[in-house]
Image: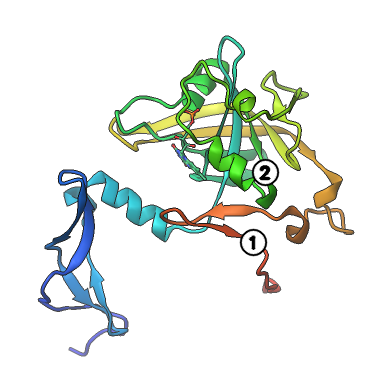
Amino acid sequence: MGKEKGAIEVAPIEARWRLYSERLTEYHFCSIPIQRTVRGYESMFIEVRDSEVLNVYQMLVGLVTPRPIAWVTSRSADGLVNLAPFSFFNVFGANPPIVVFSPTLKRDGTKKDTLLNIEATKEFVIHASTEAHAKLINASSAPYPPEISEVEQLQLTTAPSRLIATPRLADAPWALECKLLEIRSFGDGPIAANLVIGEVVAMHIEESILGSDGIPDPRLLKSIARLGAEHWCRTQDLFELTRPK
Ligand SMILES: Cc1cc2nc3c(=O)[nH]c(=O)nc-3n(C[C@H](O)[C@H](O)[C@H](O)COP(=O)(O)O)c2cc1C
């Protein structure tokens, strides 16, 4: 039988890939199956079941890129406003408008403040992540204790939301007021997903980001996004394609 086009040839090549091991807390050379692809490259095969969580995480965030960043305000039951960025985020429909982001469990298996707040108040605001705010977005990811508001620490100004009680960042070019629909949790260990599924009930959109056609113009919005490791990216290297009819 002839070889299928695109099939992978398995070759018993000596393992020489470096992977991070939580157990050894360092990178080390490890023995994993290596295959040779039809493109002539070696390719590692990672079966998730046998892999360390941190490795799976590092690989996934390096592969699934770029990821948009939700800059999220949430409010504790006592009214303290929390702010943090989340790149496990996207929009999933418009009728009704659905957004999902995932505050994963911490390395010690406990819940992040954003998740605890949304469980308590059932609402949150997602803001634009733009070049102008890159350093503040990063700074707001510091592990402040729950009684400290990142908004106050970073001297950011808030404005009231219209349909929910959680305030929004006054300086963000767009903000989405969201009501919680449900939280779906998967796993109870470090970096376990908690899908916060929200319905967008109102949008604040500054005219500064709108083109002459009245819709957001990426050249004006200047979104930033997350890549693997410590890398981020801008979104100014654009090209256009017309959708096939
Ligand atoms: C750009 C960026 C994206 C991030 N994305 C996520 C994410 O998707 N999920 C997550 O749990 N943590 C993510 N983090 C880390 C959280 O922001 C960080 O754990 C933060 O302290 C959580 O805040 P909280 O405890 O106030 O909710 C990200 C950090 C940065 C800088």
x and y percentages locating residue 159 in the rendered image: 76, 25
Mark 1, secondary structure of its residue: loop
Q: Nearer the viewer, residue 129 or 185?
A: 129
Tell which residue pokes out farthest to the top in this image. 78
- Assess disc 2: are there few (<14), some (14-19) or many (≥20) residues with their C-alpha within 10 Å of its C-alpha: many
Mark 2, secondary structure of its residue: loop
Indicate the amino acid at tag 2: Ala
Residue at the (63%, 27%) spot, across then down? 151
- Assess disc 1: are there few (<14), some (14-19) or many (≥20) residues with their C-alpha within 10 Å of its C-alpha: some
Residue at the (27%, 79%) spot, across then down? 37
Q: Is residue 197 left or right of residue 8?
A: right
Residue at the (29%, 51%) spot, across then down? 56
Tell which residue pokes out farthest to the bottom in this image. 2
x and y percentages locating residue 14 in the rendered image: 10, 74
Indicate the amino acid at tag 1: Thr
Residue that numbered label 1 is attached to: 235
- Asked which quadrant contains residue 34, the reply is bottom left
Image quarter (top left, top right, bottom left or bottom right) of the N terminus:
bottom left
Residue that numbered label 2 is attached to: 128
x and y percentages locating residue 132 in the rendered image: 69, 48
- Asked which quadrant contains residue 139, the reply is top right
Which tag, 1 or 2, sits closer to the chain's start?
2
Tell me if residue 112 comes above or below residue 67 in the rendering.
Answer: above
Residue at the (70%, 23%) spot, across then down? 167
Is the distance from the Cβ of mark 1 to the nearest ligand 1 atom less than 8 Å?
A: no
Q: Nearer the viewer, residue 139 or 233?
A: 139
Tell me if residue 214 comes above or below residue 84 in the rendering.
Answer: below
